[in-house]
Image (spheres, rainbow, N blue to C red):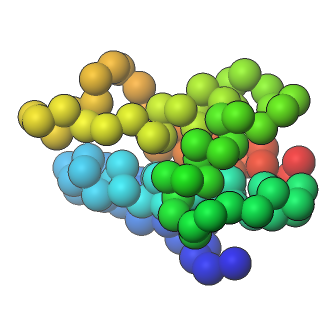
Amino acid sequence: MTGNWKVELEDASLARLSGNEGRARVCARRAAGIAARDFLTRRGVRLRTLSAYDALRALEQFPGLPSDLKSAAAHLTLRVTEAFTLPTDIDLLADARLLCDNLFWG
């Protein structure tokens, strides 16, 4: 397993505090991707790639996963608009924290 979700979440928080929301989103997605890959691997799911995007998409489809976690995974795969904003009012850092807090203990 590569990457450290705690470091990524901390980097996301620091980026947000410094006004760099784009970097905060990237770090939040990486943290959530690490959590998703770890969770899926422990359950015998083989992913085609190591990308955070693929892991989060697979997590959205995972049977029995609570709906709030599936929603968080879905939010983290949304693309930003041409204005570099999300199409809805969501907080990717909060979603990443929710996934990391729940998937590493589940």
Q: How many numbered badges does the structure rendering display?
A: 0
Outermost residue toward the left?
83
| Relative height, residue 18 to residue 79 (above, below) | below
Q: At 72% across and 22% down in the image, what residue appears?
A: 67
**Which quarter of the picture shows residue 102?**
top right
Instruction: Residue 13: tell me if it is visible.
Output: yes
| Relative height, residue 88 to residue 28 (above, below) | above
Residue 23 in the image, given as x and y percentages of width and height: 29, 57
Residue 70 in the image, given as x and y percentages of width and height: 66, 30
Between 9 and 55, the one lying in front of the other is 55
Left/right of residue 104 with respect to residue 82 in the rendered view: right
Left/right of residue 58 with respect to residue 84 in the rendered view: right
| Relative height, residue 50 to residue 29 (above, below) | below
Q: At 19% across and 32% down in the image, what residue appears?
A: 81
Residue 3 in the image, given as x and y percentages of width and height: 58, 76
Residue 37 in the image, given as x and y percentages of width and height: 69, 61
Q: Which quadrant would the N terminus be assigned to in this image?
A: bottom right
Q: At 68% across and 54% down in the image, what residue appears?
A: 36
Q: At 60% across and 26% down in the image, what residue appears?
A: 71
Outermost residue toward the bottom?
2
Between 47 and 77, the one lying in front of the other is 47
Between 83 and 101, the one lying in front of the other is 83
Instruction: Residue 32: tell me if it is visible.
Output: no
